[in-house]
Image (cartoon, rainbow, N blue to C red):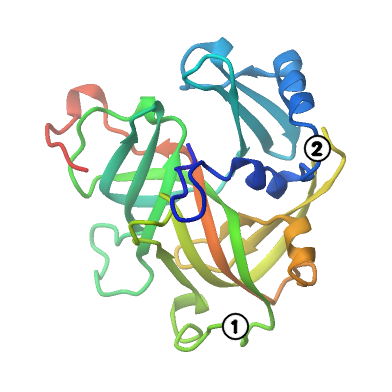
């Protein structure tokens, strides 16, 4: 689930986030829904198959559709089947009260492994939603490390230009020249991160439903690269040139993905609740 964005709007900005995976702002919503109902398949770990669907768009892109509590309307969200995995030491785990299949994880990305020097640079604070929360045990020990595959979707891009431009004071000296910080203000959306990072690569995908090109941005980050999506329509409106390797991107991104490993076996679950 992409959490309600209080201060930005009272509901998740999902219609805008669909632009990040190649759905134009003027694409008929009804057509999207009907296409997913006809051709979609059940989304894993989400609940009743008729209420939770996904439609593959090619290259790992997907649209997810979940029936709202009123059993009439649908929520549409983007998804990317990211092959990259992140080690995340969980500090807090928060469920979504109206969506038991979603959870917000907060913790440390790429914490030191046993035997590593804990003073080594690299670990950073991370927040992400996972859409397969049903896989999580009811209890976990604080600090438990899981594997997460997650991708960022742009809520706002503040800068896209020369690597030494933007608000980079003190950033270029950081590991990998990156600053990755969860937004902690009470009015900020859950799972949102402020990112300042250099683009390592731009991978070109295509949305098979709309035929539009989609840019998958790979940014330099400690641990391993992260992937981001932006709205090309919003970039043009804001006067930014198309992204290319070597540039720096700064902005606010909602991270979402899935659990990719590290869950304890039922008999080995630690009976400690946190979050």
Residue lying at 79% horizontally and 25% vertically, measured from the top left: 31
**44 or 103: which is nearer to us?**
103
Could you say where residue 2 lies in the image, as x and y percent from the top left? 49, 41
**Which residue has dot 1 on it?**
166
Could you say where residue 126 lies in the image, as x and y percent from the top left? 39, 57
* Residue 100 occupies quadrant: top left
Could you say where residue 162 lies in the image, as x and y percent from the top left? 69, 83
Q: Characterize the local packing of mark 1: few (<14), some (14-19) or many (20 or more) Cα atoms within 10 angstroms.
A: some
Could you say where residue 240 lies in the image, as x and y percent from the top left? 76, 72
Taking 189 as reference, is 198 left or right?
right
Question: Please, is residue 111 above or below residue 197 in the view?
Answer: above
**Which image quarter is the C terminus in?**
top left
Residue lying at 39% horizontally and 53% vertically, measured from the top left: 127
Question: Please, is residue 275 above or below residue 168 in the view?
Answer: above
**157 or 196: which is nearer to us?**
157
* Residue 105 occupies quadrant: top left
In terms of secondary structure, where does tag 2 sit?
loop
Point out the residue furthest to the left here.
271
**Which residue has dot 2 on it?**
27
């Amino acid at each position: 689930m992409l959490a309600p964005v209080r201060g930005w709007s009272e509901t998740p900005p999902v219609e805008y986030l669909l632009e990040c995976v190649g759905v134009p702002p003027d694409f008929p919503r009804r057509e999207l829904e009907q296409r997913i109902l006809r051709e979609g398949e059940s989304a894993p770990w989400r609940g009743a198959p008729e209420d939770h669907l996904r439609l593959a768009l090619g290259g790992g892109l997907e649209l997810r559709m979940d029936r709202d509590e009123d059993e009439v309307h649908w929520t549409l969200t983007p998804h990317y089947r990211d092959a990259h995995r992140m080690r995340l030491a969980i500090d807090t785990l928060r469920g979504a009260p109206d969506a038991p299949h979603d959870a917000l994880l907060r913790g440390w990305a790429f914490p030191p492994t046993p035997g590593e020097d804990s003073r080594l640079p690299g670990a950073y604070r991370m927040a992400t939603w996972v859409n397969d929360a049903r896989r999580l045990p009811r209890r976990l020990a604080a600090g438990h490390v899981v594997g997460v595959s997650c991708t960022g979707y742009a809520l706002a891009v503040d800068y896209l230009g020369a690597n030494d431009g933007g608000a980079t004071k003190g950033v270029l000296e950081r590991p990998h020249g990156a600053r990755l910080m969860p937004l902690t203000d009470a009015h900020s959306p859950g799972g949102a991160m402020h990112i300042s990072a250099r683009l390592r690569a731009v991978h070109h995908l295509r949305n098979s439903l709309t035929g539009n090109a989609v840019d998958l941005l790979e940014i330099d980050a400690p641990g391993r690269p992260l992937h981001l999506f932006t709205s090309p329509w919003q970039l043009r409106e804001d006067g930014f040139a198309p992204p290319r390797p070597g540039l720096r991107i700064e902005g606010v991104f909602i991270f979402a993905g899935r659990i990719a490993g590290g869950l304890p076996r039922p008999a080995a679950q630690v009976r400690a609740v946190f979050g």
